[in-house]
Image: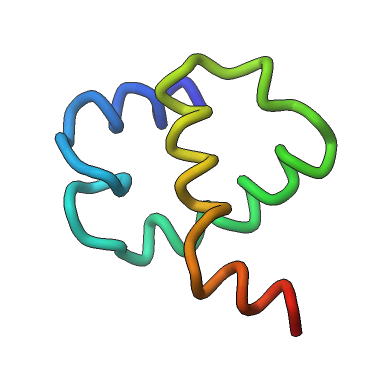
Amino acid sequence: MDNLSRAALQFAGKYLTGSLFTAADAFLLPVAARIQTYGLAHYFDENVRIYLQQMLALPAYQEWLKG
């Protein structure tokens, strides 16, 4: 995830590779969910925590959770 933090700084935007949601974000969404489930967010720096929160707040993900 340290690489995730560097990527977040390299690509200025809301998502991992910039301003558009891509397969890279979709791939990491289950990882973000596990980090939240197991309470591991405190192990990551602020940039990663912000990214994780944004991913978990996506309307499509929230709708999927509701089933």
Q: Residue at x 48, y 62 (%)?
A: 58
Instruction: Work out which residue is located at the far right of the displayed protein and give it.
Output: 38
Q: Is residue 28 left or right of residue 17?
A: right
Corner quadrant of residue 14: top left
Above-or-below relation of 2 to 7: above
Q: Residue at x 49, y 52 (%)?
A: 55
Provide residue 26's location: percent of width, then percent of height. Answer: 46, 64
Provide residue 19's location: percent of width, then percent of height. Answer: 17, 53
Provide residue 37's location: percent of width, then percent of height. Answer: 81, 44
Q: Residue at x 19, y 42 (%)?
A: 13
Above-or-below relation of 32 to 10: below
Question: How are the residues colored?
Answer: rainbow
Above-or-below relation of 11 to 25: above
Location of the C terminus by quadrant is bottom right
Q: From the viewer's side, name the closer residue of 2 and 33.
A: 33
Mark count: 0
Q: Is residue 42 left or right of residue 61?
A: right
Provide residue 46's location: percent of width, then percent of height. Answer: 47, 17
Q: From the viewer's side, name the closer residue of 44 and 64.
A: 64
Instruction: Work out which residue is located at the far bottom of the displayed protein and give it.
Output: 67
Corner quadrant of residue 30: bottom right
Q: Residue at x 72, y 72 (%)?
A: 65
Corner quadrant of residue 24: bottom left
